[in-house]
Amino acid sequence: MASTAHEAAAVRRPQTAQSTTQLMQALLRTVLRDPRGYFKLSQPFKSSPTAPFNDRFKMSVTLGSGIADWTLLLNARNPEAPPDFILDELSDAFIKYEELQTLRTWSLDQPTSLLDLLMEMRALFRHNRAR
């Protein structure tokens, strides 16, 4: 019984700033190492001077014959929350947040969560633009 209580306490234990930073780094590494090369991150910066890590990035997204410029907005204060994006005007017309299934299953603990979301956004853009 003691081991069960110990396991439950471990599950409820809040993540440390270091472990949260490591989880965020794993999300970004997965995007950067994707062999398809659709997504390029640049210009990392913090949302505030007291943010524990860079949580804002400019993105270049390859969309077939063109490139879209998006801004990735992670949340250093609430890293468990799914990211937000600032999309260029053309992308904004074709990507609707309510259609994104991966936002509903977002998990900071899943290293592919960010890449899965980006791939879904890219696919949605291409599908809606082709209509």
Image (cartoon, rainbow, N blue to C red):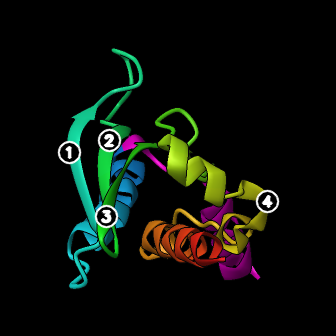
- The secondary structure making up most of the magenta span is helix
Q: Which tag, 2 or 4, sits closer to the chain's start?
A: 2
Quadrant of the rendering where the C terminus is positioned: bottom right
Give the residue number, with chain letter if any, for mark 2: 57
Which residue matches tag 1?
42
Residue bearing the label numbered 4: 98
SS of the residue at dot 1?
strand
Q: CA distance from mark 2 to mark 4?
A: 23 Å
Which amino acid type corresponds to the residue marked 4 in the rendered image?
Glu
Q: Which mark is residue 66?
A: 3
In the rendered image, residue 106, in percent from the top left (x then y), is placed at 63, 66
Q: CA distance from mark 1 to mark 2?
A: 6 Å
User: What is the span of residues highlighted in magenta in the rendered image?
Assistant: 1-17
Q: Which mark is residue 120?
A: none
How far is the residue under mark 4 from the one under mark 1?
Answer: 27 Å
Which residue is located at x 44 percent, y 46 percent?
A: 16
Mark 3: give few (<14), some (14-19) or many (20+) Cα within 10 Å: few
Q: Earlier in the sequence, mark 3 or mark 2?
A: 2
Using the image as rendered, state which of residue 99 and residue 53 is in the foreground.
Answer: 99
Q: Are marks 2 and 4 in contact (CB under 8 Å)?
A: no
